[in-house]
Image (cartoon, grey):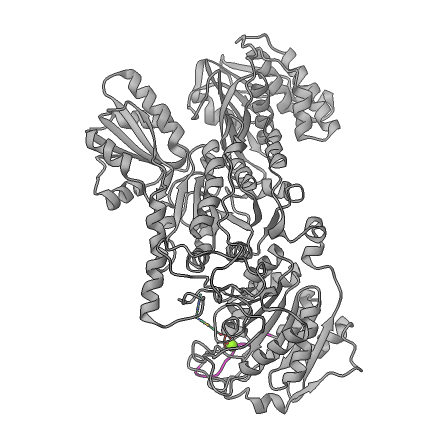
């Protein structure tokens, strides 16, 4: 079983909350969820929707065909009825004039009015859908109370129960044994990962689709004792994070491409000062303002090369909420170990997609700080030349008689400005040596599909789910063997598995949510391997498994 | 570096530069306050003034042009035990870093901001800065600067800064005493320091300042904001130096319970059980 329900309406009609309530109800009934958010860059009007897919097994992607629609306005019908399956249903208000056998018109507005607030009409519709599905509403009251104050929660609970009475059960789904799962999106997983990593300082400037990282952290500010500061701009945000990190706390900033553009000089500062720093870059389509609320993977080459000059950095693309959590923790450890900036790359698709995942394993979480509590040599050399390139790091103020000097100018081992050609060469070599060590702990990309595949797809980050599902669909068709490598670590690029798989594959296909095939070009630059075919998408909407399978089948 | 004294070292400044007295006054102020080098963090941006952290034995952070304040306030938030002082230029503070100046007045983190105001861009060889006077001819403003100068003291008071002072590097003793007061002030403290640039500013010379500045005495009440704004606007033949405005107000770290009550952020432990418990938000 595998169902896909769309909830659509205008901005301000509560699509987001209704969708979250629905997801929680499904989860309480034991189902696994993958849902996406599609919203416009406006506060009222327009058309927003969520697509909630649920099944009795783990899901890693959204799909296109719909089993049901809740239409809170007419546009929802206009835009989406084409995707409704022949046996699907559409729940809307009696007043809607659209005619179609699949439409179930109910007195949503009137019922809401009788309950005392027309804003609960969506809950009436949701109740009807739960009724059609045959699922229990036992937890409705408790779930609504997570979102609303008690009186509003009460009328919504009444509404959802009223709604369920309007319909006969059609699907007869049962509650399954509820596994111990959490329901989380990519940004929340990054934020929880940062808290788990012991991040104590987060400075950022609001920018969709990254803002919900800051929102979640801010909600925990006092309880978790983390300072969350809304900076005056992204330049301040990154320089604040660097200042806090220099002073010894784990610090992070987050933004989208536009803000990251402003942060670029600060990125170089972290590289030059060798101050650990974690940055989350949640991509949206650019350039400039682009598509503010939509998705793209257009920033890869920018992120791996941003800033003047050369210095080591690490770039990790996030693939799932689970990956987002563990990689965020890892990013802090790597940033501390190598004293470098680590950039986590996500996008709107991952940021806002809600998935059921196993509770995160906090026993896996380690805090490796690599901070020296004593110095073996005085005066202290902050930039001591070492074989690994990593210099022992001391926190300012912590050792009497020891001071820590850092400078964005080229500097000597003590941190003092230098003009010496020799010192310059030694310092560049020292910094760049760190990347050689880092390369030894890169993680190979995830592989999915037939081990000895003839068609090998290459992808990175959030397209993991759609690609994995596409590979499994193609493999059931049996004409060829398909596989995919989906990169998490993208810079430095791990090449072991890539070289190995490419040797055997007859066709190599890059699958990317951008117009120029940036991963393909990085692979070519690093290994000389050229892709034979590209599956690209840059309309701001996430690619579905079907989009990929159709393109790959059509490949010459 | 490591030592127990704020010894100052050789510099890249021109002979006769106003920065020397500022450096010396800073050393005097820190010693008078009985600070130890490892307890003090000096932050600069980029410029000639911004090299100050390099020349005094303390923790030092020379960051980006214009970005000294964000790094400094965050370092203070991370470790409230550090005495954090920004020493940087007028271009750095009011030009490239103007936005941070505005918003860090509002933030009111307990740091001290010493602006070496030579009314010129020194390191880049003499272009107009935000405080350069109208008519001042430079290699870029070849017909004389046409833009009105910014009045940082007036601006800071208008923005709500709680400690605003002006000083002159030609009067080291007076400067050091103002520095002591500024460092002791609990909150963001701005001291705009006239610093003659002997190479690129031939107008606002030592002589120019010396013949104009006068010290505010006990008859001046720095707690009246309107009077302070009037005082801040005095410019021309007579320019006041001293504490122009002073008001006690809660600093950033006092407005956040756990920062105020707890140990410095850098010493706080992570309560993993508590954070694990946040997974309940997602069921
Ligand atoms: C982003 C950036 N832009 C420009 C510069 C070049 N620059 C360095 S210092 C400076 C101005 C310095 O003036 P000020 O802050 O008044 O310091 P002074 O040298 O006068 O002490 C400029 C424009 C730079 N380093 N970084
Ligand atoms: Mg200057």
- The range drawn in magenta is B142-150
| Percent of width and height locating residue A400 | 59, 63
Q: Is residue A281 visible?
A: no
Residue depicted at x 43% and y 79%: B125
Task: Say whether residue A555 is left or right of residue B145.
Answer: left
Residue depicted at x 68% and y 77%: B178
Q: Is residue A64 above or below residue A342?
A: above
| Percent of width and height locating residue A157 | 69, 21
- Tell me if residue B149 is in the magenta stretch: yes
Q: Is residue B240 above or below residue B41?
A: below
| Percent of width and height locating residue B140 | 42, 79
| Percent of width and height locating residue A154 | 73, 23
Q: Is residue B216 above or below residue A306?
A: below
Residue depicted at x 48% and y 43%: A292
Residue depicted at x 23% and y 20%: A480
- In terms of depth relative to the viewer, which is nearer, A93 or B250? B250
| Magenta stretch secondary structure, dominant | loop
Where is residue A504, by image quadrant? top left
Q: Is residue A57 above or below residue B99?
A: above
- Tell me if residue A139 is in the magenta stretch: no
Task: Say whether residue A213 is left or right of residue A522.
Answer: right
Where is residue B212, by image quadrant? bottom right
């Amino acid at each position: 079983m595998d169902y896909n329900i769309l909830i659509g309406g205008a901005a301000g009609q509560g699509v987001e909350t209704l969708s979250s309530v629905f997801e929680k109800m499904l989860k309480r009934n034991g189902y696994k969820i993958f849902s996406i958010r599609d919203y416009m860059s406006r506060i009222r009007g327009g058309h927003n929707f969520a697509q909630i897919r649920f099944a009795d097994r783990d899901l890693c992607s959204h799909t296109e065909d719909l089993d049901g629609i809740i239409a809170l306005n007419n546009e929802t019908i206009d835009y989406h009825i084409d995707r409704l399956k022949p046996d699907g249903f559409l729940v809307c208000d009696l007043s809607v004039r659209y005619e179609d056998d699949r439409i179930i018109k109910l007195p949503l507005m009137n019922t809401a009015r009788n309950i005392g607030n027309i804003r609960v009409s969506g809950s009436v519709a949701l109740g009807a859908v739960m009724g059609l599905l045959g699922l229990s509403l036992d937890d409705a009251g408790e779930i609504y109370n997570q979102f609303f104050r008690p009186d509003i929660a009460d009328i919504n609970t009444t509404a959802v129960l009223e709604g369920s009475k309007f319909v006969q059960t059609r699907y007869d789904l049962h509650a399954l044994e509820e596994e111990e799962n959490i329901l989380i999106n990519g940004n929340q997983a990054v934020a929880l990962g940062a808290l788990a990593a012991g991040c104590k300082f987060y400075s950022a400037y609001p920018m969709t689709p990254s803002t919900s990282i800051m929102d979640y952290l801010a909600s925990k500010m006092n309880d978790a004792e983390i300072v969350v500061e809304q900076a005056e701009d992204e330049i301040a945000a990154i320089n604040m994070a660097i200042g806090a990190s220099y002073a010894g706390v784990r610090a992070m900033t987050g933004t989208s491409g536009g803000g990251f553009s402003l942060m670029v000089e600060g990125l170089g500062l972290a590289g030059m000062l060798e101050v650990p720093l974690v940055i989350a870059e949640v991509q949206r389509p650019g350039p400039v303002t682009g598509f503010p609320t939509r998705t793209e993977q257009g920033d890869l080459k920018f992120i791996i090369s941003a800033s003047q000059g050369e210095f080591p950095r690490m770039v990790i693309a996030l693939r799932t909420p689970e990956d987002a959590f563990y990689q965020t923790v890892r990013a802090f450890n790597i940033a501390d170990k190598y004293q470098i900036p680590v950039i986590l790359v996500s996008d709107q698709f991952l940021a806002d997609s809600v998935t059921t995942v196993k509770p995160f394993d906090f026993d896996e979480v380690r805090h490796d700080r690599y901070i020296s509590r004593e110095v073996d040599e005085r005066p202290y050399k902050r930039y001591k030349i070492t074989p690994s390139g990593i210099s022992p790091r001391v926190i300012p103020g912590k050792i009497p008689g020891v001071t820590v000097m850092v400078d964005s100018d080229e500097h000597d081992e003590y941190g003092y400005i230098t003009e010496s050609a020799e010192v310059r060469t030694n310092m560049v070599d020292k910094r760049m040596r760190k990347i050689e060590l880092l390369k030894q702990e890169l993680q190979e990309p995830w592989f999915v599909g037939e081990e000895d595949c003839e068609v090998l797809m290459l992808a990175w980050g959030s397209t993991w789910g759609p690609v994995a599902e596409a590979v499994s669909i193609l493999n059931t068709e049996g004409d060829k063997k398909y596989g995919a490598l989906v990169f998490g670590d993208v810079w430095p690029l791990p090449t072991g598995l890539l070289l190995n798989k490419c040797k055997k594959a007859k066709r190599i296909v890059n699958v990317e949510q951008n117009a120029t095939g940036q991963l393909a070009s990085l692979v070519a630059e690093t290994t000389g391997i050229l892709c034979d075919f590209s599956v690209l998408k840059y309309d701001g909407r996430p690619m579905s498994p079907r989009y990929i399978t159709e393109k790959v089948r059509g490949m010459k | 570096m490591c030592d127990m004294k704020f010894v100052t070292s050789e510099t890249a400044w021109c002979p006769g530069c106003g920065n020397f007295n500022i450096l010396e006054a800073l050393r005097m102020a820190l010693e008078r306050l009985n600070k130890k080098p490892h307890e003090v963090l000096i932050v600069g941006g980029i410029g000639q003034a911004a090299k100050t952290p390099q020349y005094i034995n303390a923790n030092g952070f020379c960051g980006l042009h214009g970005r000294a304040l964000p790094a400094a306030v965050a370092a203070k938030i991370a470790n409230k035990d550090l005495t954090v002082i920004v020493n940087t230029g007028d271009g750095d503070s009011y030009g490239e870093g103007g936005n941070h100046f505005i918003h860090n007045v509002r933030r009111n983190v307990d740091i001290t901001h010493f602006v070496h105001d030579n009314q010129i861009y020194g390191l880049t060889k003499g272009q107009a800065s935000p405080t350069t006077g109208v008519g001042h001819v430079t290699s870029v403003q070849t017909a004389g600067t046409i833009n009105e100068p910014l009045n940082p003291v007036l601006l800071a008071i208008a923005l709500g800064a709680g400690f605003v002072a002006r000083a002159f590097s030609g009067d080291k003793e007076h400067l050091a005493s103002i520095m002591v007061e500024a460092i002791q002030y609990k909150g963001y403290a701005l001291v705009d320091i006239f610093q003659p640039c002997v190479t690129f500013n031939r107008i606002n010379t030592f002589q120019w300042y010396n013949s104009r500045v006068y010290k505010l005495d006990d008859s001046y009440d720095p707690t009246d904001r309107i009077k302070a704004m009037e005082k801040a606007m005095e410019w021309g033949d007579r320019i006041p130096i001293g504490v122009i405005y002073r008001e006690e107000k809660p600093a950033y770290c006092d407005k956040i319970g756990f920062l105020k009550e707890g140990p410095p952020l850098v010493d706080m432990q992570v309560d993993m059980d508590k954070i694990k418990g946040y997974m309940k938000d997602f069921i």
